[in-house]
Image (cartoon, rainbow, N blue to C red):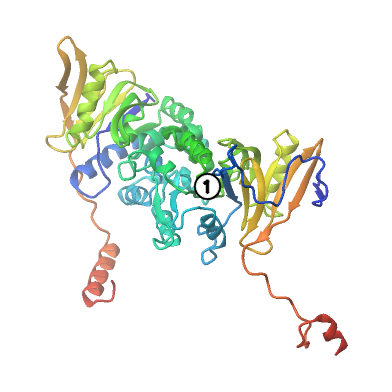
Amino acid sequence: MEPVHAGEAVGVNFGPLYKGRRASPEDHLGMEIAPRQIVAFGGGGFSMESGNPLLDDYVLGLCRRERPRVCFLPSASGDADHYVVRFYRAFPADRCEASHISLFRREQGPEDLREHVLSQDLIYVGGGSVVSLLGVWRAHGIDAILREAWEAGVVLCGLSAGSLCWFDEAVTGFHGAPRRVEGLGLLPFSNCVHYEPTSERRFAYHEMLRDGMRPGYAAEDGAGLHFVGCELDRVVASRPAARGYRLDAVGPRVVEMRLATAYLGEAPPVRRLPGADSPSLATASAA
Amino acid sequence: MIPRILTLGGHDFTSRPPDRAVSELMLRLATERAGGRPKICILPTASGDTSEQIGRFYAAFGERPCDPSDLSLFRLGRRPMALREHLLAQDLIYVGGGSMVNLLAVWEAHELSAILSLAWRQGIVLAGQSAGAMCWFESGITKSSGRPEPEAGLGLLHGSLCVHYNNEPDRRAAYLDAVGNGMPGGYGLDDYAGLLWEGEGPPSAVTARRGARAYRVSSGETGVIESPLPARFLPAPAPAALREDIAEFRRIKSMRRRAGWLG
């Protein structure tokens, strides 16, 4: 069954959704406390968009320190060397204090994982196999450490497997037919990445929603879902056309809602009519 | 076919004689199982599927009478494979070294543990070194978290195993401690020493390098006892004669290098 496309005005079934405001939680003394933040990319950042740093710049901009501490977790790739090298190139020392944790070579990395993770401003999780990622994290107790870091205000972000992992349930299409996996459950939604209009994952996700998977969010390559607390705060994108989506099933119908997405680059130039030199359309037609 | 497992304390896939001797033994076991040209597959999971480990495996077996393959769980995205069908079609499954904790966690996540014990019961030879050897036992001593610590394995083999016995005194000390404190006894294996398990009986020890030993480690009245096991020496096969075209290629390459054409 074809999904029903709803415009943004239809919000009645969705509960608290997209509010388009910056959250700034305060404690009872009026002091600002560090909010819990997760930015889940459908795909993008240095791993997929070399030469387009918009999403990576955005997550760095969420950190409060001028030279933020950024730690890369490449577990989903099996800690592939070339991936770690690309991370250090994308996050050079003049912009941030970069580090990585390799769970396949613990003898080389920081000895106390918890201490290291909690001292960061941003945790960046790479792509790969989310099933392997979660298996390895649980074996090393990183799952609990990341929850603690999130609650303490360390910004969590990632693409692909590094997006799926934060949610209650996710659609993995890493190999074979797409299937349902249980994530860390920091965000009480389902999630689907690389959500391109004709992708196999998209159809699989709709099927899962009909089968009772909890409602959730999807993002196309280049789109990032920014959650503050457990609420979607805004959708940002490194490509003008990339979008995020909210998905829900109402009985046998899947309702897919395209979310307003803020392009992080400069606004594309206004197209002018051919032959018109004047900037305004009115003058152009008068000429 | 009786279930067989070859566990090694440590080795590599180079062209050095002890490494060639180990590869030769694996090839012989696989050929016996196949009754012809065997299929052998490396599971490089414990290393995070590094190209290095996979490349060395192919370098060792690529020119031998067998069909080598690799099953890289972290690379399935680019190269999908049917895990169960592929593994159960093998004659020998080799597990490389690395992090034992990650190996078992990733296998569990992909439901490989059950497939491997089925393969074992079907007589597919299981082999491995380091983490890839300890994983078959009830427990082993891993450095997956930095310091050597006991870790539970799949338990296809009774007792425990400690690898790199001669090379890593801290691992050996942790093992003797753990056995003294109630961990089931088992074996210590030097690099290039191995145990071949056939059916239910006790294993036979093999060694590919003079001086490399296998030890039985058990807890007794007077503390933990290490007793060396008599081991069969594995001679290295003569290096395969280089095929003429390869030799020619290498000659040209070295001439070019001398002339400064290649970096």
Q: Is residue B37 above or below residue B7?
A: below
Q: Mark 1: give few (<14), some (14-19) or many (20+) Cα within 10 Å.
A: many
Q: Is residue A136 above or below residue A123?
A: above
Provide residue B223's location: percent of width, then percent of height. 17, 14
Residue A231 at least partly seen: yes
Taking the view exactly as shown, the residue that stands out farthest to the right is A286
Residue B32 at least partly seen: no
Q: Secondary structure at mark 1?
A: strand
* Position of residue A240 in the picture relative to residue A110 (left or right): right
Count the labels in the image.
1
Subunit under mark 1: A
Q: Which residue is mark 1?
A: A155
Provide residue B101's location: percent of width, then percent of height. 38, 33
* Position of residue B9 in the picture relative to residue A275 (left or right): left
Q: The disc labelled 1 sits on which kind of residue?
A: Val
Q: Is residue B201 above or below residue B235?
A: above
Q: Nearer the viewer, residue A65 or B26?
A: A65
Q: Quadrant of the C terminus of chain A?
A: bottom right
